Amino acid sequence: MQHMKAPIPETNKYAVIVAGGSGLRMGNPVPKQFLPLLGKPVLYYSIAAFLDAMPGIKVILVLPQSQASYTDMVLSLLPADADITIVPGGVTRFHSVQNGLQQVDGQGIVFIHDGVRPLVSKDLINACYVQALQVGSAIPAIPVTDSIRRISPDGSAPVAREELRVIQTPQTFVTDIILPAFGQSYDTAFTDEATVVEAHGGNVYLVTGERNNLKVTTPEDMIMAEALLNARDQDE
């Protein structure tokens, strides 16, 4: 007898998408989240992925106020009925996310995603959602494949890469965990949302990430993203 898979419970869903980068490492005056990727801004793909994966999701877009004109271009490419709120960024990522979380107005699941990770897949978004519902958090991570060495004044020493993981986004939490965590004072040790939650006494749980879920930072990343998007379009 075949067992039916239990349906995923419905709850409020929020995506806080942080896009505060510049074009410095790209050597381009246009902020990297607005650079064209196969004819559409990088940020478009990041937003569209959540709208496609999670119907009814509320997208909270965190951007510097100076980038308003670029933002209009992105919004014009998205469905007119998409629930998108734009809030100003802060002086650090912590403060930008904090600003975005102020728009979360009920219990549910919150995804916090880098606006320059345009290749996040529907499968990864759903995996994060399911795990966060079950255990409270889901932090995408992939194994380190390169050899790693720790530098010290005396030289360097190898590090066991089997014990290391590269962390990605969307870092995903239930509201009861992420909202109180961002009520605490800022600390320079906060490198991502997981470190904020841990500093507040919460537990974080990893979920298997995806190598294609790259963060676009350099011109080489744009070339890779274009190739991956082309390959994905051909598969579909």
Image (cartoon, helix red, strand yellow):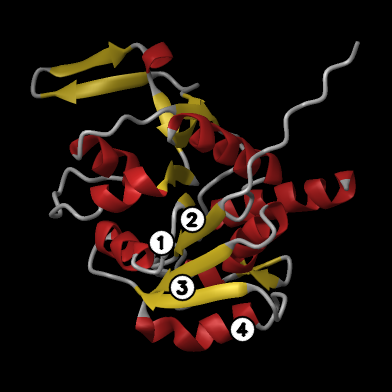
Say which residue appears at 20% left-offset and 24% top-offset: 151
In space, the residues marked 1 and 2 are separated at their CA atoms by: 6 Å
Q: Earlier in the sequence, mark 1 or mark 2?
A: 1
- Viewer-nearest of discs 1 and 3: 3
Q: Is residue 56 left or right of residue 13?
A: right
In space, the residues marked 4 and 1 are separated at their CA atoms by: 23 Å
Say which residue appears at 16% left-offset and 52% top-offset: 184
- Viewer-nearest of discs 2 and 4: 4
In this figure, which residue is indicated by the disc labeled 2?
A: 218
In space, the residues marked 3 and 4 are separated at their CA atoms by: 13 Å
| Relative height, residue 127 to residue 14 (above, below) | above
Q: Tell me the amino acid under the disc marked 3.
A: Pro
Q: How many marks?
A: 4
Q: Tell me the amino acid under the disc marked 1.
A: Arg
Say whether residue 21 is visible: yes
Label 3 element class: loop
In this figure, which residue is indicated by the disc labeled 4?
A: 73
